[in-house]
Amino acid sequence: MRGRGRGTGGDDDGGRGGRRASVWRRAGIALAALLALAIGVAAWAYRHLDDNITGVDIDQALGDDRPPRAMTTPTPSASPLPTEALNILVLGSDSRSGADNKKLGGGDSGGARSDTAMVFHIDAGRAAATVVSIPRDTLVDRPSCPLPSGGSTRPAYQAMFNSAYALGGPVCAVKTVESLTGVRMDHYVELDFSGFAKLVDALGGVTVTTDEDIHDEDSHLDLAAGTHHLDGKQALALARTRHGIGNGSDLGRIELQQKLVKALLDQISATDLLTDPAKLYRVADAVTGALTTDTGLDSLGELTGLGQSLRGLTSDTVRTVTMPVVPAPSNHNRVVADEPEAGELWKSLR
């Protein structure tokens, strides 16, 4: 009897061992399935974000008739990220293309304008930057620009700066900026109304301090002087406000836009996106979904590399200035570059 009892006990141990092995096998299969799912989701997310980006071949369209590239020291092979200086033309487009842009008050989809124009000069080493705003009301000599459909535009003298984008798109905007500044644009980035608002919302809003009350019927913005935490729609209204502040000129709006640039840098610095994958994805989706870039930045990998190389920038290391201007002799509602101060500013960025 005892022998049978021991034998029975051995069978029970074998049964429990078999059940444990079965449990581990099922757990292993479940873990493998979860890993496969995670990899699949990550791959889908990467493809989705990568496909979001629209690229424009600026370099091929403009050819070699451009300012020379800045002389830079080659990046050491041991450096994981590029460190050379960069000049990036950033445009805010008022296109009404798409339901979201139309709802936010964009312009005619067939005649979008560059509502905001900034040259981001990033110093060698990527630890500091200068942001130069170009007033949209500036009168410039617009060069002949190639058109996507073939042929080219005619040169124009004393033309509105933002007419370059309206007439010839990103290529003409870049060529006009290079003609005005003598500075080669290494990259081009365009963000529309919807993308800007979604970016601010994805970051959880942005905190801005205004020095005066703002009441603008055109942008539908009412803010008392002081500090405010704005959502995407309010931040966009602030970026577009001009008639509710100062003398209603574009220079007052530029000052608000520069405040927003610094506030966004502070918000990004305060948000640890790497510890919150869901927020990181929302931010990336908001940016890439409304982004047009040159072909040197039109992939998620290239944009990520640029972003990582700029992670040391903060509002304290970014200087914001406006191109020196004076009222145009021919029209006091327009401005022209104030020389030699404007030329000296652009020379410092070459």
Image (tube, helix red, strand yellow):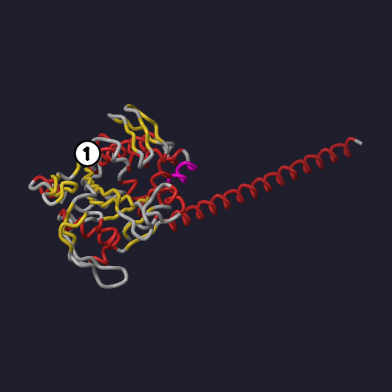
Q: Which amino acid does label 1 sit on?
A: Arg
Residue 21 magenta: no
Give coordinates of residue 333: x percent, y percent: 19, 47
Q: Which of 80 and 325 is in front in this view?
A: 325
Compared with 58, 194 (above or below) is above
Number of numbered callouts drawn: 1
Q: Tell me, yes or no, if residue 309 can be seen here.
A: yes
Where the N terminus falls, by quadrant?
A: top right
Circle 1 crowding by C-alpha within 10 Å: few under 14, some 14–19, many from 20: some
Q: Which residue is drawn at 47% across and 39% down?
A: 276
Image quarter for residue 57? bottom left
Q: Which residue is drawn at 12% across and 52% down?
A: 330
Report the side of 222 relative to 39 (left or right). left
Numbered range of the magenta stretch: 277-283
Q: Nearer the viewer, residue 293 or 229?
A: 229
Report the side of 231 relative to 159 (left or right). right
Q: Tell me, yes or no, if residue 312 can be seen here.
A: no
Residue 282 magenta: yes
Q: Which residue lies furthest to the top in this view?
A: 226
Give coordinates of residue 296: x percent, y percent: 31, 59
Report the side of 16 relative to 122 (left or right). right
Q: Which residue in the protein does label 1 denote?
A: 319
Q: Which residue is drawn at 31% across and 68% down?
A: 148
Q: Which residue is drawn at 60% across and 50% down?
A: 32
Q: Which of 58 and 323 is in front in this view?
A: 323
Give coordinates of residue 110: x percent, y percent: 36, 61
